[in-house]
Amino acid sequence: FVMGNRWSRLPPEDIERGRTPQRDEEFCSDTETVHEQFQALRAALALSDHQRKEAELRSERLNDKIGKMELELERLREEKAAKDCLVVDLEKELRLATQDTQRSHTDIFDRSSAFRRLCVASAGVLFQDNLIAVEYQEAIHSLSGRCHGTIELGVHAVEPGKNLSDADMYLELSADDKRSLVVTPLPSSAPPGPTFSRVLNVELKGFFRGPLGCRFQVRVAGLLHSVDFELPLIMTKFVVPLLCDTNNFFELWWDSALSQCADVVSLAHTVVQDPEALLARVSLGGRMHCVCFRPHPPNTGHRWRDTQIAEAMCMTSGRVPAHGGRTTDALVLVKCWAGSSSDHGTAKLEVKSTDAALGKLVLETIVRIVTQDITANGPTTYPRTLH
């Protein structure tokens, strides 16, 4: 090579390996690029490690802060629990002090008698103590195909000038009764005041025993007051008169398909003194039709308990219209024979019904209200049942 080609300057071994000056430059450039990337990666790793350490430090600080907040929250909860206990104790002391300084209405108000009276009446005072009074009112509609009604409970403070607030009502039925009676409390948002009311819708799906348990919780002038009582919503409230004469009554009475139950009971003093009171109770306050009533019947030869001759007798008839899954009315017939003068305070009750459960419930109700006196705790309103 006379012209001095640059290839002549390379050693023969480099020419054989294919190395050229251009390739050397490219190789150096690639090496620098890799070195720069490596430096950048090391810087990124260092930055990432620094950020990780800062994150760990922040996490430790946050955990410490959360721990301190949890300890503070636990302390506040303990303080609140102690204050709540103190408030409850103070309310009890204030309530006891109020009861000591005021005349107690619990001693003069007979809750059991009020309940029995409302078993045949549709309105009246149901409960009263030294702080609140509860008035009961019902409207039952026993119609063919549906038996339903409305119950209203009116609550007012006994002492003038005291307001009622934060009222809650809790209802309780047995498991069997829940399937037979649907109770729907209507919503209420009454502001604090001397009175408030609660309304319940009820619908009959089958025969139930009752009664309906109720608990009221209300604040009277800021003091929490809780009372328990029973609502006189029982199966006989859905009975309506079965109109028939004496011949129809006995034609039904001697039907062998009817179930029968009976009892001999001692009559209450007021029932003994007033035959009309006996009729009012045996007819369930007018819910059953009076077929026959003889306060002093002639000696017809009717004897019971071996020797005693009936001195007063009455017969009533009623029915529960078809409802729920029932297609026919359930009939119920009652005969009551009062004792003779030698045993004036005794009576024989006989009940026949097309449904054994209904007959027993009617007998239990009549026995409850004829064997114990009923005092008048406020005005009595007898039912206006639609049929």
Image (tube, rainbow, N blue to C red):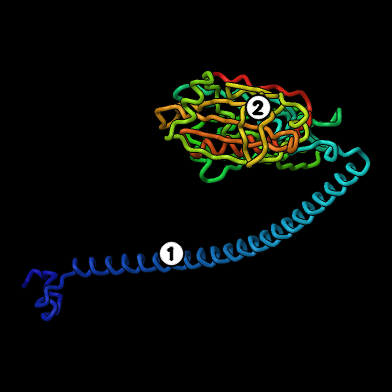
Q: Most extreme residue toward the right, as rendered?
A: 101
Q: CA distance from mark 2 to mark 1?
A: 120 Å
Residue 152 seen anywhere in this rendered image of the structure? no
Residue depicted at x 73% and y 29%: 135
Residue depicted at x 66% and y 32%: 310
Asked whether the beta carbons under mark 2 and mark 1 sit within 8 Å of each other, the answer is no
Is 300 above or below relative to 173? above
Residue depicted at x 46% and y 34%: 258
> Which residue is the site of mark 2?
299
Q: Nearer the viewer, residue 346 or 44?
A: 346
The 10 Å Cα crowd at callout 2, few under 14, some 14 to 19, many 20 or more, is: few
- The percent position of residue 133, horizontal first and vertical second, equals 78, 32
Residue depicted at x 60% and y 21%: 292
> Which residue is the site of mark 1?
44
- The percent position of residue 281, horizontal first and vertical second, equals 67, 29
- Left/right of residue 385 with respect to residue 13 in the rendered view: right
Query: On the image, which quarter does residue 66 sit in?
Result: bottom right
Of labels 2 and 1, the one closer to you: 2
| Number of dots carrying numbers | 2
The 10 Å Cα crowd at callout 1, few under 14, some 14 to 19, many 20 or more, is: few
Q: Amino acid at mark 2?
A: Asn
Query: On the image, which quarter does residue 274 sit in?
Result: top right
